[in-house]
Every structure is written in structure tokens, then in C-alpha cells.
Image (cartoon, grey):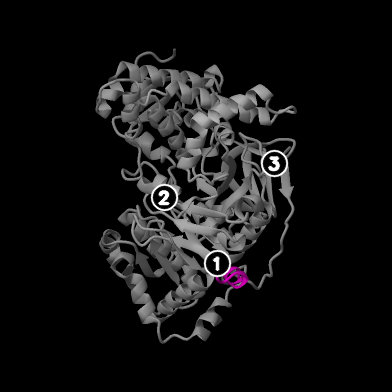
Amino acid sequence: MDEFSTPLLIEVDPSSNLNALFAARVQSDPDSPVVEHKTQDDGPWIPLTGRELDAEVVAVAKGLVARGVEPGDRVGIMSRTRYEWSLLDWAAWAAGAVPVPLYETSSAEQVAWILTDADVSLLVVESAEHAATVDEVRPDTPNLREVLVIDDGAIDSLVAAGVDVSDDEIARRRALASLADIATVIYTSGTTGRPKGVELTHGNFYELTVNAVADLHEVVSEPGARTLLFMPLAHVFARFIHVLVMPAGAVLGHTPDTRTLIDDLASFQPTFILAVPRVFEKVYNSAEQKAVAGGKGAIFQRAAKTSIVYSRALDTPRGPSPWLRLQHKVADVLVLKRLRAALGGRARWAISGGAPLGERLGHFYRGLGLNVLEGYGLTETTAPATVNRPGKTKIGSVGLPLPGSSVRIAADGEIEVKGIQVFRGYHANEAATDESLTDGWFRTGDLGAIDDEGYLSITGRKKEIIVTAGGKNVAPAVLEDRLRGHPLISQVVVVGDAQPFIGALVTLDPEGVPGWLAAHNKPALSMAEAAADADVLASIDKAVERANKAVSRAESIRKYRILDTDLTIANGYLTPKLSVKRSLVLKDFSAEVDALYAGKRDD
């Protein structure tokens, strides 16, 4: 099948906007919690009702007006994920402004580009450190009038400034935008080249969220539904969810520090979780290592295998046998229920995006009782274009198009998307817009296939296809995703363009190595020592062998090298959404790539 569409479920008044979506939630149940937040890391979750949240949004919006923000002005937000981020976003919309997110990890050069390209007039940052980054480039941003710092009382300052602004003025501004108007400009992470500003409209968010809620009501709208955001709100996936909870009637929490994530999950008790595959891999690997360290590694591994086999059996006509059901109950008592407890104890659903999750891990979590609905989308599609649904899940696929969306496969295998979520264009970049959009179809740059029932599978990235010296086309994601699931491995970059065989650059996981060493009764080692350790290398060798089973011999990894440094956001080799900047890695580690192919040219 080359094309598949899902019809629209809910139509939205074209004259409406996101402020109306927010107002509908507040009016429907003004005295029930909408968000919960903490004032200190180890403190309790404090609920805010719809009425209370609306009052805070209006107060901050008045402050923005008093500070000179006019309808259509760009207001920048540079912060980790926290309640104030959501508050500022809704307040900017209430003031008629266009919020522009900046990752808190952005370099001074990236900050300067976004502030100038988007013409940001007022910027709110989280900390003095972020303010210092902005100060480095302040002379290059002449239109930036003011920088406010959340940790230095920015919210209180805005509220105090707006006391003389009338409620009528905020009500007037809230009604100005229509679905066709720009709601935000989100800059792509920039795995290659300078980030482009993606213009997303009120309609992109409004129409997509209400239709997604109608289609995923069992996940996001069940009684007591709640979710904890720990992904960066500067990323479109988290931003989409922060809007979606409004029509869903769910409660939203924020946690800015992933180091406290497990504790926050336990106390917040989300019913659905949103994460990239790396998070699910880390949870699995951490649990396995703890079990091995406690002398229960064999029990964990049997339970994990039972969970996977049980989940796969759910997809067969007869379902799990009575004996398998019994084994699954035993595995649940011994292992699986503890993992559910670590996720808060109430989570039944998870939505995974950003990269392929992997069939094995998907089955493991479903057998655990956490149904991971894998989806697919980009910034240009307001996050999700496709997603698996409850009762309509094919593990290993990224699901069906959302209502109001179409997906097709071009002649060269590229995935193209059309529908209510597709962006209107790149900011001040007509050439890039024309290159990406044709008759409303967005060329994603990803490769995929659609099965006979309309389920989409991702097979690779068009620009990342490796062509070996023998002319074999190789999609690196297949191998990379499998290897990254190993507890010793942090990142993998498959190489081999114009070379006689496929190789890989591998980095060790600083968090995973100590646990693996302890679990295997080995002494503590530095990263350099671990990279040369025979047992570590033997384990990675086996992981490579397993990954190679997914591809032909011509596509398999023949050699690999372990780099002496990890690839992280901090050192610039990962984007904030944890995508590898492949071109930069290949440039900076060209000597390591050359070493893979030195001497013997083919084995």
C-alpha cells in the first residue's frame, strides 16, 4: 500500500484559537485540578484548579502587556521543563503573542540565531546561567528589549507590573487569533546545518489535540488521567502534550530534573507516560542490573522472557495458553509488579516517539502491563502524524495516521504526510518551505513502508542512507537502535559510506558501566579501562552479533571502535531530543573511522 488516510473526527470553528481551548477546559470544571507542581524538589505536589490556573495565566499575561508586548510579538522562553514554562506559554497566547521556545542547553550562537531570526522582543530565562549566555550575544540582538529570570522572580515581577491592565484587554487579545494564525515558532534541533523556524498555527495544535483525544480517549481521558512531563517543553512532543491535557481533562505535572524522575513518578503516579525510547531502554537496563547485583539476575531474565513471550501470544488467534498465563503470573509476582511500582504503580499506557522503540522492548513492556503506543512525527507535523491505538496496535510499527491525516510513500521510499497537523512553512525561509511542501504534502526525509492495513513502519533516514563500495544501501538506524539497548552502550554511529564493509563507532554508558561491572563481579574500572576489558568487549561482541541478525551479511557490522568520550548534549554531539549529530561525529572522529578501514580492506 502506498497511501493511507484516517478521516477527521471533530471539526473546529476556523475563527477559534488555543485560548478558546483553554477556556473550554476551565469552564467545564473550574474547581478540579488541571496542573500539579512543586515549590521544592522534595515537597508535595500542589494542585491548581482550572479557575486558579486561569487567574495566574491572566495575571502574567497582563504583565506581558504592561512590559510592552503587542499582539503578534515574539516572546522567548528558555527554561527546563517546569510549571512556569506552561504558565508563560498560556500567558503569551492570552496576551496575543507568539511564544518561541529555546532549549536551556542552547549555545550562545544558537541563542543569537533564534532571537534574531524570530525577532524575539522579550525573553524569559530560567536561571542566571541562561541570562549569562544571552548576555554574550546581546549586542547581536538589537530588538531584544528585556530579559527576565524565573529564578530571580520573573513571574512575580510580571504579575506586579500588570496590576493596572484591565481584564477586558486580556479578553480582547485572547479573541484575536484564528486557527490559521501562528501560535509558535519552534526551531528544529539541527542535526545538520542551522536550525529552521517551524511555524505552527493555532489550528495545528487545536485540531490535532481534540482529534487525538477523541481517538485516544482510553489513554488520555480516562477518569483520573494524569501525566508527568519530563521531556523538554522546547521540544514539540512535550509541547503537544501540554496542550492536549486541556481537551483531555487530564492533570499535568512537571519535573525539571531527570535525576529525580523515579521518585517523582512514584509520588505523582501518572496514568500515562510520554518518553523517547532511550528512557524505556534505561529503565529496563537499570532494573536488570539491580537484579543481577542482588543475585536475582536469572529470575529477572526469565521474567523478562516470559513477559515478551506472553505479549507476543496476545497477538495470536488463541492467545496465551493456560500454562503461559500461569508463568506470567509468577513472573509478575517476582519481578514485573515491582517495575510497575517504579513507574508510579498506576501507569497503563505510554506513548513513545522520536526513534524506533524496538519490537522486543515493546513486547516486554506490554507483558509488564504498560502498553507502549509507538508513534511517529516531527516538529513540522506538530509531533504525532501516526500512532498505535488501544486495540489497534502492531508492535514494531508506528501505527496508523491520526484523524484528519494522510501518509503516503513516495517512489523513492520517502514518507510524506498531509493533514491538520502539517506546519504552514519555515519562518522567513521560502526556499526551504518550497522544498519540503508540495500540494500540502510534507516530505519528512524518513523512509518507510505502509502495510495492507495502513500501519506505518520506519526503515531509515533518507539522508543517512549509507552506500558501501559494493553499492549496497544500508539504513543505519536498524543496527543502531538494537545496539543502544545494551546496558554497556550509550550511543552508536554506523559508518561505511563508500567503504568495503559496515563499521560502527560505539560509546560506553557512564551510568550503565558501573552497574554492569558490579553485576558481573568485576572491580570498578574507568571508562578507558572498561573499553579495553576483555569481558566488556566480549559482551559488546555478542550484542553486535545479535544486532547483525536483523540484517543481511552485506549490511552487518564487521568492525567497531569504542570512542574515548560519550556523545552528549553537553559536548554538542546530541540534539536536545537525543538525536546524534551524525555529520559532526563523522567530522570530529574521522581518524577513528579511518582506523576501522586501515590495513585489511575487506573481511
> Which span is picked out in magenta?
20-32
Q: Would you say the magenta stretch is mainly helix, strand or loop?
A: helix
Vertical placement of residue 35 versus 397, above or below:
below
Residue neighbourhood size for the residue with mark 2, other residues' Cα within 10 Å, grouped as few (<14), some (14–19), many (≥20): many
Vertical placement of residue 84 versus 318, above or below:
below
**Residue 580 vs residue 371, the one in the foreground:** 371
**Residue type, mark 2 in image:** Asp
**Residue 558 vs residue 370, the one in the foreground:** 370
**Residue type, mark 3 in image:** Lys
Q: Is residue 517 left or right of residue 74?
A: left
Q: Earlier in the sequence, mark 3 or mark 1?
A: 1
How far is disc 1 from disc 2 in space, using C-alphas? Answer: 21 Å
Secondary structure under tag 3 reads loop
**Residue located beneath label 2 in the image:** 264
**Looking at the image, which residue is at 47% across and 23% down?**
299
Q: Is residue 369 left or right of residue 9?
A: left
Residue neighbourhood size for the residue with mark 3, other residues' Cα within 10 Å, grouped as few (<14), some (14–19), many (≥20): few
Residue 392's label in the rendered image is: 3
Q: Earlier in the sequence, mark 1 or mark 2?
A: 1
**Residue located beneath label 1 in the image:** 32
The picture places residue 312, in percent across and down from the top left corner, at 64, 28
Q: Earlier in the sequence, mark 3 or mark 2?
A: 2
Q: Tell me, yes or no, whether the highlighted magenta stretch contains residue 29.
A: yes
Q: Tell me, yes or no, whether the highlighted magenta stretch contains residue 597.
A: no
Secondary structure under tag 2 reads helix
